[in-house]
Image (cartoon, helix red, strand yellow):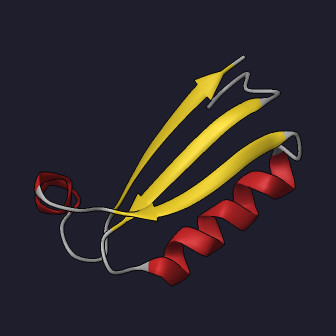
């Protein structure tokens, strides 16, 4: 997320909401103008993230 001043970040977790919230807090501390949303991985995404893992995506604007 280098150079991200404002935009959106989506965090999807696989049975690890605590880690997702910690990551959100870390992102907001460094980038207060970024919108961060947390969701759950479902289906095939759960397979790729594995239990306890997260997938993170971002959009710059």
Residue at 66 percent across and 26 percent down: it is 2
Closest to the observer, 44 or 53? 44
Q: Report how many numbered discs are placed on residues in the image.
A: 0
Taking the spot 40% from the left edge, 79% from the top edge, the residue there is: 16
Q: Residue at x 61, y 73 (%)?
A: 21
As displayed, is residue 14 above or below residue 42?
A: below
* Up-down relation of residue 44 to residue 1 (above or below): below
State left or right for residue 50 relative to residue 61. left
Query: Residue shown at 66%/62% (left/top)?
Result: 24
**10 over 60 or under it: above or below:** below
Which of the 4 image quarters holds residue 58?
top right
Residue lying at the far top of the rendered structure: 61
Q: Position of residue 15 (x, y in %)?
A: 33, 80
Position of the N terminus, as image quadrant, is top right
Please indicate whether residue 56 sits to the left or right of residue 60 in the image: left
**Residue 17: horizontal and vertical position, in percent?**
48, 79
In which quadrant of the rendered image does the C terminus lie? top right
The picture places residue 57, in percent across and down from the top left corner, at 47, 38
């Amino acid at each position: 997320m280098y150079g991200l001043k404002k935009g959106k970040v989506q965090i999807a977790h696989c049975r690890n909401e605590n880690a997702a919230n910690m990551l959100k807090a870390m992102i907001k501390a460094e980038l207060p103008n970024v919108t961060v949303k947390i969701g759950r991985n479902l289906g095939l995404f759960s397979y790729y993230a594995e239990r306890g893992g997260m997938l993170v995506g971002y959009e710059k604007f």
